Image (tube, rainbow, N blue to C red):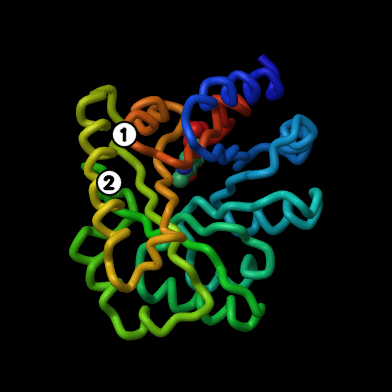
Amino acid sequence: MSILVNLNNFKEKLKQYEVTLVAVSKTKPNEAILEAYQAGHRIFGENKVQEMTDKAAQLPKDIEWHMIGHLQRNKVKYITDFVSLIHGVDSLKLLKEINKQAKKANRCIDCLLQMHIAEEDSKFGLSKEELLELLQHDEFVQMRNVRIRGLMGMATFTENQDQVRKEFRGLKQTFELTKEHPHVQSESFNILSMGMSGDYEIALQEGSTMVRIGSAIFGKRDYNK
Ligand SMILES: *Cc1c(COP(=O)(O)O)cnc(C)c1O
């Protein structure tokens, strides 16, 4: 099936929800992105800094680039000029660096805090305690060049749908609670990024407002990233 057909099928499926589709183009060539672009799609997700900066330099300027992968502090500076949303913020240190680089770039950068919701310990993310700690921190309160738009999470990679549902439901609860936190601007705290090709249906049922879809649009990746 073509990218165009996949994309349109997806948009049809998402119609009944108020949800933003991030087309995850990691490992895919510019031509694949352009195919989706020509079909009107503008939001693309990448998980490697080098790959994202290369693609951003070569592709149309009105693409919104989302950094969905784990971001190393020393690489933040390469994306602050153009990144539209950073999904994987999982420490105060990283957020501080984003704030610092965003200030240099004279920008305020939208970020999501990544929560650890899966059973696997390999997955990045904050615990609920760490989230609270971050939100309470003086340094966080003083940041002017980042805006926390919501939360992101990845469920356990498992066939067990109940498990996945439970994890997404927990994340949605944390999302609603965090929205009420005095250090969060509740009007702009409105993004819950959860759901990938294998589990987006459950994520949508559990209140996702942003799904990150790669292989179901672009086909299987040659190597798993
Ligand atoms: C690769 C990736 C996705 C998309 O995965 P698919 O299963 O191909 O849809 C979503 N989120 C993150 C963080 C990823 O790294």
The answer to whether one can see residue 224 in this image is no
**Other residues around mark 2 within 10 Å, as few (<14) / some (14–19) / many (≥20):** many
Report x, y in % for residue 34: 78, 37
Q: Residue at x 41, y 84 (%)?
A: 142
Task: Report if the beta carbon of the residue with label 2 is closer than 8 angstroms to ligand 1.
Answer: no
Considering only vertical position in the picture, is 96 above or below 161? Answer: below
> Residue 175: image x %, image y %?
30, 52
Q: Is residue 203 above or below residue 83?
A: above
Q: 206 or 2: nearer the eye?
A: 206
Relative to 8, say whether 42 is above or below: below
- Quarter in which the N terminus is drawn: top right
- Lower position in the chain sequence, tag 2 or tag 1: 2
Horizontal and vertical percent for residue 36? 72, 32
Residue at image position (26%, 43%) is: 118
Residue 150, image quadrant: bottom left
Q: CA distance from mark 2 to mark 1?
A: 9 Å
Instruction: Identify the residue at horizontal 51%, vertical 77% (top origin).
Output: 99
- Amino acid marked by disc 2: Leu
Q: Which mark is residue 206?
A: 1
Q: Is residue 108 left or right of residue 92?
A: right
The residue type indicated by label 1 comes to: Glu
Marking on residue 77: none
- Circle 2 sits on which residue? 171
Q: Is there CB contact under 8 Å for labels 2 and 1? A: yes
- Name the residue: 59% across, 82% down: 103
Q: Nearer the viewer, residue 95 or 47?
A: 95
Residue 44, quarter of the rendered image: top right
Q: Residue furthest toward the top?
A: 1
Query: What is the total number of numbered labels drawn onto the structure image?
Result: 2
Q: Is residue 220 above or below residue 115?
A: above
Q: Secondary structure at mark 2?
A: helix
